[in-house]
Structures are given as C-alpha cells and as structure tokens.
Amino acid sequence: CWGSGGERGAPASSSADDGMTWWYRWLCRIAGVIGGMSCAVAGLWNCVTINPLNIAAGVWMMLNAFILFLCEAPFCCQFIEFANAVSARADKLRAWQKAAFYCGMAVFPVMLSLTLTTLFGNAIAFATGVLYGLSALGKKGDAISYARIHQQQKQMDEEKLTGCLEGQAL
C-alpha cells in the first residue's frame, strides 16, 4: 500500500480511498460553497426581525455558513489561523460522517423557525449532505459483475450440496 508521499507502508489519505471521482468531489465542494452562501444570506435576512426564534435560527444559519466555508473552501477563511487545520481534519472524515453533520446542521435552524427563509436558505446545505451521503453508498455495480457473483454463489451451493450427498452415501 503506497502512501500519498510514495513511501511504502504509509497510510494513504482517506480522500483517495473514499471512491469519489474528482468531478463528484468538486461537485460536493461547490455545493458546499453555494450552500454556505445561501445560509449566510438567508441567515442575515432572518436576523432582521423581532422574533427571537428567527434571530436564533439566523445566527445558527450564519454559523452553518462559516462551518461550510471552513470545511469546503478554507481559502475563503484565510484570515483565520486554524482554517487549514480544520479543513484537513474535515477531509479525513468519511463521506457518511460529513453527510450526517451537514444534514443535521441544516435541519436545526428549520426546527427552530419553520419559515421559507430557513427552508430555502438551508436547502443547498442539506443537499450537500445528501451528495456526501450518496457518495457513501458507493458506486452502482454493473450487471456483469452481479451475474458473475450469482454464478459463483450458485456453484458454491452446488459443491456444498454435492459434498453433503457424498457424505451421506458413505
């Protein structure tokens, strides 16, 4: 197993092992950045009210935007010293962990204040979590590999049955 530095025995990075193609990884990142922008704008708009739950939901949405930018596009947060460290740690997370985190993050403001602003503002952030969740499921197999697996299982079952019958005959 070759590491990312070419050293034998070094663990490969989890981003190379997650099975995501380069274009799907970029799609997830772009969705995260757009989701962050929509959360920021909708969160700011949500704070322009006197209802305390709307203000809390708006603040949470702006926090979601900050976290999305920090994890998906750390170059947007260059003024923060720990941005690259957080992004590197987020890249080490598995796709299902990112999916659960992003979807949970997007659902909370909607539960606080169910308005169109919170729904539409968090929709793209939630969609980012869904994209990561779909990548966690893995690729869909082709019919040839399924047929091959089915044939191997059928052959093993026949061998087991033949072995049982020979054992009874003796």
Image (spheres, grey):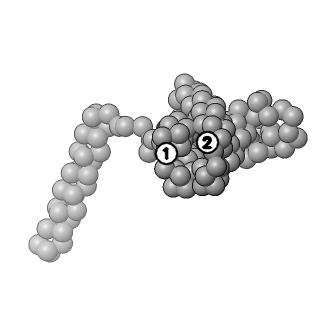
Q: Is residue 118 above or below residue 156?
A: above
Q: Quadrant of residue 164?
A: bottom left
The first of marks 1 and 2 along the sequence is 2
Most extreme residue toward the top is: 23
Q: Which residue does the image show at 18% across and 56% down from the upper left?
A: 158
Mark 1 neighbour class, 10 Å CA radius: few under 14, some 14 to 19, many 20 or more? some
Residue that mark 2 sits on = 46
Mark 2 neighbour class, 10 Å CA radius: few under 14, some 14 to 19, many 20 or more? many
Figure quadrant of the C terminus: bottom left
- Relative to 105, 120 lies left or right: left
Residue that mark 1 sits on = 115
Q: Quadrant of residue 159?
A: bottom left
Q: Position of residue 83 (x, y in %)?
A: 80, 40
Q: Position of residue 94 (x, y in %)?
A: 59, 48
Kind of residue at badge 1: Thr
- Relative to 152, 16 lies left or right: right
Q: Which residue does the image show at 76% across and 30% down from the upper left?
A: 76
Q: Position of residue 66 (x, y in %)?
A: 71, 41
Q: Dots 1 and 2: beta carbons under 8 Å?
A: yes
Q: Quadrant of residue 45?
A: top right
**Which is more toward the observer, 50 or 95?**
50
Figure quadrant of the N terminus: top right
Most extreme residue toward the front is: 50
Q: Which residue does the image show at 55% across and 28% down from the upper left?
A: 27
Kind of residue at badge 2: Asn
Q: Which mark is residue 22?
A: none
- Relative to 21, 85 lies left or right: right
Q: Secondary structure at mark 2?
A: helix
Q: Which residue does the image show at 80% across and 39% down from the upper left?
A: 84
Q: Secondary structure at mark 1?
A: loop
